Amino acid sequence: MSTHRPALLTDHYELTMVSAALKDGTADRRCVFEVFSRRLPSGRRYGVVAGTARLIELIRDFRFDPTEVDFLLRTGVVDDAAAAWLTDYRFTGDIDGYAEGELFFPGSPILTVSGGFAECVVLETVALSVLNHDCAVAAAAARMVTAARGRALIEMGSRRAHEEAAVAAARAAYLAGFRFTSNLAAGERYGIPTAGTAAHAFTLLHDDERAAFASQVATLGKDTTLLVDTYDISQGIRNAIAVAGPELRAVRIDSGDLAVIAQQSRELLDSLGATETKIIVSGDLDEYSIAALAAEPVDMYGAGTAVVTGSGAPTAGLVYKLVEVEGRPVVKRSEHKATIGGRKVAVRRHKPTGTATEEIIVPQGVPDRKPNDRMLQRSYVVGGEPVPLPSLDESREHLRECLISIPWEGLKLSAGDPAVPVTVVPSD
């Protein structure tokens, strides 16, 4: 990947503020910005932090090259002073936040960006574009993982997303507990296990279904998955076992009444001696349809459109707001959009058994910590330099542990209160 990040990841209005702040002398005022959500998407009981490591990489390499600065000058977006400032831009501040894989709730300060006003404000769009997308996908994927009850899931939604969003979505889904992705770029870039099988086009290419299956098995061996619903599913299964034998790894079904078909397919496979052949189902699955198949003999689910689009909530609803200037809390008082001033510190409170009971947010202060409290923020960037981060697999395990820690009601797919209540402690 290129280490250069285009200036146009910044919005016009951000550079308007930079130009004005440079002119009036406020550009270097020490400020604190926070990323948080005022509310969770309808029907959700938790959010999932995802994409932070991607964001830190983008910020590390965030530069304005001469051609971009020239464009901004020619089009009147910035003046000469702002153009000179952009030419030398490098983020030199600090970034703290919740770990990837952490759960968040309304008001949770999941990212804190500190530094000069100008150097922080130009990061608003890139921060929100990454976090709103990745957090939305991870939350949807986590709900699907819960609904699957330990059965494996494969992310296969690349064809329903922008090419780079597809890679990011695969990463977020894996973080949330999906076992595989069909996106090879995500496999190469992030080390995510990849999996896939032939499409209906491959079957249609051949003179008959058996010929297509024979070709696939001859190339990939019996440890492959045959798509059996191009024509008649029952005959497709018979053809698959006739060609590959009962040692065939799996069959995939992509259409029809999956609950009924899964039962019939299992019975047919068993009658043909293929008792170890797995059944994979796909076809516009979301967390609700996956949950509806919980009692059926399904071994793996393939999810595409729903997971890469946040399953009805394509954005996490995160905002990036100024909360402190030169150590002084600042607040926005707009109706329904008011903010709480001051830099926040957050802890998650737990019972001795490990069950989370409350999230405590303290503006401009230090929380009164109890024995089973866990601090939620960690350092990402110090003085402009990124610090070492957990691996993707470590973040994946962190989310798994977080989901275990919340009360079981918080895992329901139905609408309800946030899984963990949030308390904001008034500042002195």
Image: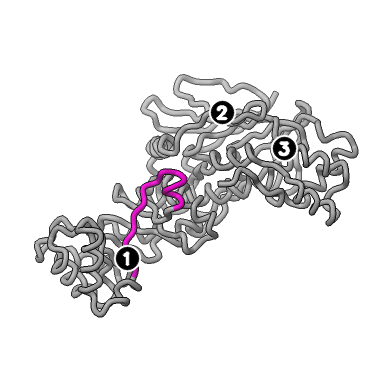
Nearer the observer: mark 2 or 1; the answer is: 1
- The residue beneath circle 2 is 387
Residue depicted at 85% across the width and 44% down the height = 19
Q: Earlier in the sequence, mark 2 or mark 1?
A: 1
Residue type at the position of mark 1 = Ala
Observer-side mark, 3 or 1, equals 1
Query: Is any part of residue 416 visible from this angle?
Result: no
Residue plotted at (54% across, 60% down): 162
Q: Earlier in the sequence, mark 3 or mark 1?
A: 3
Residues at marks 2 and 3, CA–CA distance in whole angstroms: 18 Å
For disc 2, the neighbor class at 10 Å (few under 14, some 14 to 19, many from 20) is few
Q: Is residue 186 visible?
A: yes
Q: Which span is picked out in magenta?
A: 185-199
Query: In the figure, residue 59 lies in which quadrant?
Result: top right
Q: Compared with residue 402, is residue 10 higher up or lower down, i.e. above or below?
A: below
In the picture, residue 123 is in which quadrant? top right
Q: Which residue is mark 1?
A: 198
Query: Residue 12 — which label?
Result: none
Q: Single out the mark in the foreground, 2 or 3.
A: 2
Cα–Cα gap, marks 2 and 1:
42 Å
Q: Position of residue 185 (x, y in %)?
A: 46, 52
